[in-house]
Amino acid sequence: GAVVSQHPSRVICKSGTSVKIECRSLDFQATTMFWYRQFPKQSLMLMATSNEGSKATYEQGVEKDKFLINHASLTLSTLTVTSAHPEDSSFYICSARGPGYSNQPQHFGDGTRLSIL
Amino acid sequence: AQKVTQAQTEISVVEKEDVTLDCVYETRDTTYYLFWYKQPPSGELVFLIRRNSFDEQNEISGRYSWNFQKSTSSFNFTITASQVVDSAVYFCALSEESQGAQKLVFGQGTRLTINP
């Protein structure tokens, strides 16, 4: 149980393109999903917390207009990297808190490797 | 602010050796949760364990064991009789209940290489 699916797994596109990444909880409802960014050989840095039916909460230093987050249903959150540039190239990974109490562990998607040429 | 330190950036051992990954954390909260995640080369994060701040019992799961000591703010992870498949980056993480969204703070990770 508690499977999180992330799509696409890899994206290569030209500078200026907008890229949408989907994060789905397959077998449970997730009122809260998280988006992380990971640079090579570095740790995961939380970008934003996505709450179903409300605006996402962004961490300090993360551009809201650059990284658009939509959490329209209890099983789907999307991250759109708008007008992507080479410096946006990174590994993006989402997670969803498991069902039940708020202290449930986060279950992660397989990540999306974004390469902007 | 909360902080997680994994001082060992990389560890390399020969298969069948035991290996311990260190994790030290900082928090002002009395209620918090600690986690270990495994990230194999494919990139996904695999949940290994969660421990709450009120439970200092050590835990064993097969070849994996965890030693939680509040006195030293440490939550170390030991792999016994390591195998090549254990090669991965391991992250220790802290979640504080005081934060409404239960955000995770990750350590820098320890890259573990098990050589045949």
Image: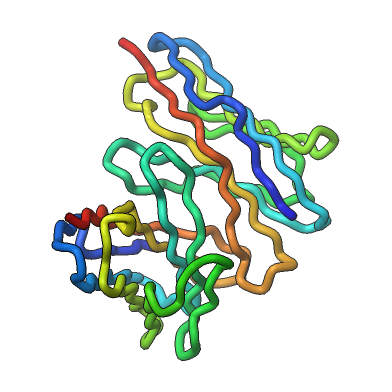
Task: Give the x, y percent position of residue A76.
Answer: 34, 78
Which residue is painted at 43% across and 34% down in the image?
B89
Q: Quadrant of the C terminus of chain B?
A: top left
Instruction: Establish if B16 lies above or below A99.
Output: above
The number of numbered badges drawn on the structure is: 0
User: Does residue A111 show up?
Assistant: no
The spot of residue A27 in percent (x, y) is 34, 70
Q: Is residue B106 visible?
A: yes
> Residue lying furthest bottom in this view?
A53
Name the foreground residue: B33 vs B28: B28
- Foreground: B70 or B12? B12
Dividing the picture into quadrants, the one containing residue B26 is top right
Looking at the image, residue B28 sits to the left or right of residue B58; the answer is right
Residue A100, given in percent of the width and then of the height, sits at 55, 72
Closer to us: A34 or B14: A34
Q: Going 36% across and 41% down the picture, which residue do you hit?
A: A40
Q: Residue at 42% across / 77% down in the picture?
A: A29
* A42 displayed left or right of A10: right
**Residue B89 located left or right of residue B23:** left
Of residues A100 and B94, which is closer to you in this image? B94
Q: Residue at x 82, y 54 (%)?
A: B28
Image location (x, y in percent) of residue A36: 44, 59
